[in-house]
Image (tube, rainbow, N blue to C red):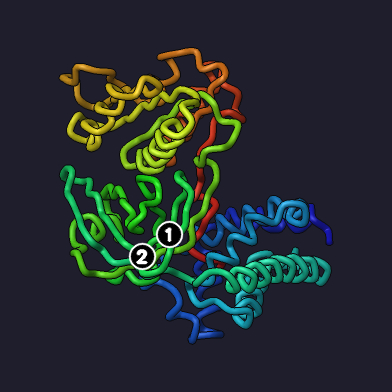
Amino acid sequence: MDIPALQASWRNVEVIGAEAILYFYSHLFMAHPEVRAMFPVSMSDQRGRFFTALGHIVTNVDRIADDPRFVEQLGRDHRRFGVVADHYPAAGASLLATLQYFLGEAWTDSLAADWAEAFGTIATLMVQSAEADERTSPAWWDAEVIGTERRSIDMAVVRIRPSQPYSYLPGQSMAIEIPQRPRLWRYYSPAGVPHADGTIELHVQIVAGGQVSTVLARSLEPGEWIRLGAPVGTALTLAEDDSDLLMVAGGSGLAPLRAVIEQIDARRYESRSGGNVHLFHGARTQWHLYDHRQLSEWAETRPWFRYTPAVSEDPTFPGARGLVGTIAAQTHHWAGYTALVCGSPGMVEHTANELVAAGMARMAVRFEQFHQQAPTRLP
């Protein structure tokens, strides 16, 4: 396989953007109309995710054999859409047709063979991962909504109870599908440790134009049922060698960090040992600090925990004002700390850059990238 040629051909198609994506899906749905029902009605988000995932795979195609985790996770994720082994050849044929159409004379027999081999390798890994996962886990979990609470105009707490045991680590996330928006899966994180009664608390911030977040925060009623994907992500989970932690959250990015704080609290209760935690929670205005009372109480009663709220758009706020990443970076010299960062993509990027510029090692700054690396499905 000529990997440089494969990657160069992808770059040439990738710059075409939306036209190439539209061609791929048009070809797929015309050749196999039966698969259209597996996709959401609105394809705008799905199109971008497909090319993001494929670009990630092609860029790293020479390392997939040594580190197949990304592709294997894609295979497991596809189970919740009903994707089976027979669907992969259809997607592969449409991908090759798309590449051939846009590469024109640059599309040679050898390049076609390389792409067919690469896609076959990816598809095999995905299918094998899905089959292994099927032996131990359902494709999704049904969960009942047992309560909702509006914390502000654009923030709600939703409590759910899966119908089957659902195990996760504090700091992980799961994809969620609501009946009002079929096949539009969005990632959310439990805001606490697993409870004995199986209930899970979600923090839902309404995103402007968000098709899922608006319904999830405003319209779901107790007694309705939603679906959960398998828990994913390890970047924000607590490692055995984690000592002192700096946590920086933006908006509802607080949820997974709050779960880790509960986990640390339980461990300290059992062993009376552990490092320090300093949480910075950023929001636009004071009333967006939706969990301020609970976090303040923890800071007053737990000597190992410090809490700094910060707002960026309220000049009357009596505390820290500005972007939370900048405030966190400038507050302390964080040598020896590990940073856990969660929020919008822009907030995470800004915070990571600020912390590194302030002297933290980049490897000490951890965050998830579901918006980039965990697409709805491939294709």
Q: Is residue 238 above or below residue 20?
A: above
The residue depicted at 25 percent of the width and 28 percent of the height is 297
Tell me where residue 258 appears, x and y as whole percent: 37, 38
Q: Amino acid at mark 1?
A: Ala
Within 10 Å of the Cα at label 2, are there few (<14), some (14-19), or many (20+) other Cα atoms? some
The residue depicted at 49 percent of the width and 61 percent of the height is 230
Q: Which mark is residue 162?
A: 2
Question: Is any atom of residue 134 visible in this view?
Answer: yes
Residue 107, quarter of picture: bottom right
Tell me where residue 8 appears, x and y as whole percent: 73, 53
Q: Amino acid at mark 2?
A: Pro
| Local SS, label 1 | strand
| Local SS, label 2 | strand
The residue depicted at 51 percent of the width and 59 percent of the height is 375
Within 10 Å of the Cα at label 1, are there few (<14), some (14-19), or many (20+) other Cα atoms? many
Task: Tell me the distance, in whole angstroms, between the alpha carbons under discs 2 and 1.
Answer: 13 Å
Tell me where residue 280 appears, x and y as whole percent: 36, 26
Q: Is residue 239 above or below residue 377?
A: above
Frontmost residue, 99 versus 303: 303
Tell me where residue 317 appears, x and y as whole percent: 19, 21
Q: Which mark is residue 285?
A: none
Frontmost residue, 51 versus 260: 260
Q: Is residue 343 above or below residue 322?
A: below
Left or right, 18 with respect to 199, comes to: right
Total number of numbered discs in the rendering: 2
Image quadrant where one finds the N terminus: bottom right
Residue 269, quarter of picture: top left
Question: Is any atom of residue 346 visible in this view?
Answer: no
First in sequence, mark 2 or 1: give its number.
2
Left or right, 275 with respect to 220, comes to: right
Q: Which mark is residue 175?
A: 1
